[in-house]
Every structure is written in C-alpha cells, then in structure tokens.
Amino acid sequence: MPLEAAARLVSELTSRGYNAEREAVTRLAAAEDPNAALERVLEDVPDDALVVRADHVESVLSRTDTTGSPRTNGSDTGDSTELGDENAGGEPAERTATRTDASSTDSPPSVSTGTEGASGGNSPDRSPVETEGSASANRLADPAIRSLKITGDMTGESTGTGEYSDFVSVFRDRLERLGSKLRGRVNHRPATAIQGMPGGSDAAMVGLVNDIRSTASGHWLIELEDATGTFPWLVMKDREYVDLVDELLCDEVLAMEGTLADDSGIAFVDSMYFPDVPRTYEPSTADRHVQAALISDVHVGSQEFMADAWNAFADWLHTEEAQHVEYMLLAGDMVEGVGVYPDQDEELDIVDIYEQYEAFSEHLKKVPGDIEIVMIPGNHDAVRLAEPQPGFDEELREIMSAHDPQIVSNPSTVTLEGVSVLMYHGVSLDEVIAELPEDKASYDDPHKAMYHLLKKRHVAPQFGGHTRLAPEEKDYLIMEEVPDIFHTGHVHKLGFGKYHNVLAINSGCWQAQTDFQKSVNIDPDAGFAPIVDLDTLDVTVQKFS
C-alpha cells in the first residue's frame, strides 16, 4: 500500500470528522479507485459512527466490483467481532501523571494526583467495538517518517543442544567480547602467565568471576578464570573499594590489577574494573517530537488482570493528548500462563493457554491500529523458560496478529527513530536483588538493580542460579552496544532513572496483587503506562487505576 495514498485517505477522513482503523485504510488504498470506494463507504456507514472500521469497507467492497456495479452474488456480511462482557471496560479510571527528566538515581518516581478522566476526543462511553483498532488521523498523517529497526533477535537462531561444548562456547564468547572492553584499560596477562611471574611484580588479569569468598581475617578472595586457568585475587578489607565486592556476581567479566605476593601464589588487588557504560556516553534522540509507551506484564487470564485500567489506557491512546504516542513496546508476560507457580490454577480466570492469548489479542485490538507494536516474551508466556527466549511460535503469532506487531526474542534491541531500546523481560532482576545489599538493589527501586546490569554489560550474568540460561554458540545476553534506553518488567514495580545517561525503566504491570504475590510480599505497581519522549528521553507516567 503506497504510504502517500494512505495519508491522503486519512486526511480526507479527518476532514469529514472520522477516525479509521489501519486495516480499513489498507483496504481502501488497495481498491482500484480508492476515492470512489471511500465515497461509497462514507455513504454506507451509520450516521453516528465515529470510526471507519475494516468491516465497513469490506461490506461495501463485497457488494460492488471494481467499476462500482453491484455484484450479483454479494451480500452485506461484515466480519466485525463483538466482545464479551468480560472484555468491556467500565467508566475510565481516574488518571494521574507526572513528568520528569528521569535523572533521579536514588528514588522511584512520585506521581502527582490529577482529576481529569482518561478518555477524551470521542465519546467517553463508546463501546469497545467502536474503539477496536481505530486510528488517530493525526498520528497516521505521515507514517513515512517513522523508523523501526530490530537487532539481536535470535528467534530461529537457537543451536544449543545442552552439550558441554555449548557451555564452553557461550562462556568463551562472553569472555572474549566483554573482555575486549577491558583489555585496553589494564596490562592484561593470562592466568598461566601470571603464575610464572616473580613475586612483587605488577599484574593484571581479565576473567570471569569463578568464586567469591571471605577469609578468616575478613578479607575477600576473588578467583578469576580465563581460557588458560584460574588465579586468586585478594581484596583487603580496609581498602576503599572493598564495597565493590558486594556488587559482584559469579560469571560476570571483570578486570583486576595489583601486586603479586612474594610467592606469586596470590595477587593483592589495587583496582578493579567493570565493562560498564562510559561516563561520557551521550544517548541518541529522535529528530522530532514522538513518544513511545513502555509497558509490560499484562497477565491476561489472571483473575487479577485489571481490564478496566487497560481499557482506560486504550481509550487514552485515542485522545489528542496521546497523538504523539506512535510506538508501544511490551516487555513480556502478555498472559498469566498455566502452571507457572504453585496453585496458580486457583487464581486463573481463563485456564486454557490459547484462550488466554485470544483474550489478550482482543484487548490489544482496543489500542489504536496505527501504533507500531513490538513484543518480547516473558517467563509467564508460552515459550521456553531458558534465556535467551525466542519469540512466540507461529500459532501464537497468528492469534496475536492484531495490528501486525513485531514479535522478537527476549532480549532484543529496538531502534526507534535513532533511539535504541534494549528490551529484556527481567527475570535476572530477582537474582540481582537477592544477591546484592538492599541499599544497592531492591524491589522498591527496580531501576537501581538495572544499573548493575548496565555496569556489567550483561542482562543475566550469573549462571546456575534462579535464572535459567540456555547455552548457545554465542552469548545473546551481552550488551554489545550501549542502549539509549533499557526497558524491563517482571518485578511488577515501577521505577526509572538514568545511569551514565542511559534511561533505565521498569514499567510496572496490569495485574493487581495475587494471593501468591501476597505470600512473597510483592506489592505491585499496577495500571501505569510510562510514556517516553524520544526527542528528549523525558518520561511521563500515566496512571489508569
């Protein structure tokens, strides 16, 4: 479909007071005479219609041939889908918002209370059928200037078999690629070479953290491993950087330099280095005012899925206030899933996994059809649990085909008009929060835990713990390039801030507290939609619950 034709059709619809579904515009533009087809459709739509839907267009085109003559076997058979009562939202929830430059690094965002309703533009009591997939004409006016690119999608690229050689390959790849970011900062020597150096020599090594343990005297012994062997490094308890030991995770890549003991059997650490984000990093920004909604953890199928909040969010996206929201990034857990945790079946509203995705698709249809959508899976979704997680299979993609979303692996990097967004569901955040001291990582400040992943340049560095990792020929979990935005979900908490100018944002959820969450003391931040200005990287938090 030529973009110019679509833009002209939408412009004409706008001038006559209509919005339109993307599919409706596509079908009109594909007609032999789009202008004549448009006139026939507008004559046919109900007088009170605000949105031209695909079934309106199909109904007209099915009754006429390309010359405008009636078909002899045609009938008015639109294929619109009626939603059940369980999908219909109530009155729009009260909405609150706050705007910030996301520069805070020591507290989650506060939200100032407002009183305006969440719907606007069209009638606030319109039915879900009237809003399904409808497009903001202003948003679609010039789609040619949009730019969306995907990198790091490993869907269809998985080659791991679980053999020992696969594990060797993935850790060698990690050491090589992250080590290359450190070798220029120290005079690196392999472990075996350091073992042969005389006592008292200066030494430096880049390796994987193989072990972390305290000594009887209160010092810390860090064992680094490279492709040649291992070597122990002692961090003295009275050194100023000893606090960094609390941040270490096994299997991350690290550089250390120091002085060998007299017998050359150990080295005393003078400094340590992480791959890290350069302090001078300058993020890219879009050349125009355009926004992206960053959300996650919808959990359709749960008894606690907040349908009213979602409907209010979808309604808001149809308003003039949201006309610059042209992208939506969903960071996993579209549905509640089945058998994810003990006794989950007692908390399910939909017990069949495919029916959960069908219900999710119906909710997704309420989002304006001209918003570009990118989705990655999470640990509740019907994909393998081991990370990296390939994108959904063809059957689920077909179910979730509304708006033709981009479905990619977890993690993947999405570049929106020059702004790179690393999308990762965030299961490893549980491990980071469990391993690090509370003042450095907590569920109340999920963005702080994300800072540590940025510092390590890896979304899930520790192997063999809570996070399941799949061995592949290469390590798909490395942050090879610094992202401009790091987007996660999973922990159901809202938090954002900047680490070395990288915007880290955890986007909360759309599920109220479950009995299981109560049992593990999780109090979710539900019904939030963080909106990022891609031209400034400012964040506005919209609340719909």
Image (spheres, grey):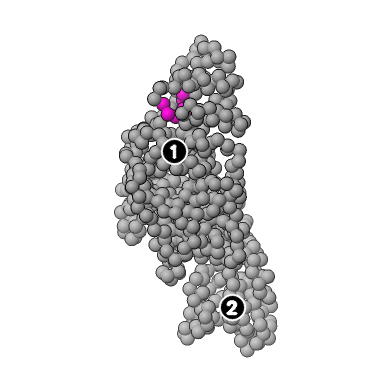
Q: Residues within 10 Å of mark 2 (few under 14, many from 20)?
A: some
| Camera-nearest residue between 89 and 376 | 89
Front tag of 1 and 2: 1
Is the C-beta separation of discs 1 and 2 under 8 Å? Answer: no
Query: Residue 98, image x and y in percent?
Result: 41, 53
Q: Compared to 518, does 390 lie above or below?
A: above
Specify which label sits upstream in the sequence, 1 or 2.
Answer: 2
Left or right for 200, reference 41: right
Label 1, secondary structure: give it.
loop
Q: Is residue 96 visible?
A: yes
Q: Is residue 306 visible?
A: no
What segment carries the magenta color? Answer: 49-56
Query: Residue 300, image x and y in percent?
Result: 39, 44
Measure how far apart labels 1 and 2 are at the Cα level: 54 Å
Q: Compared to 344, does 437 lie above or below?
A: below
Residue at image location 51% in from the left, 71% down from the top: 248
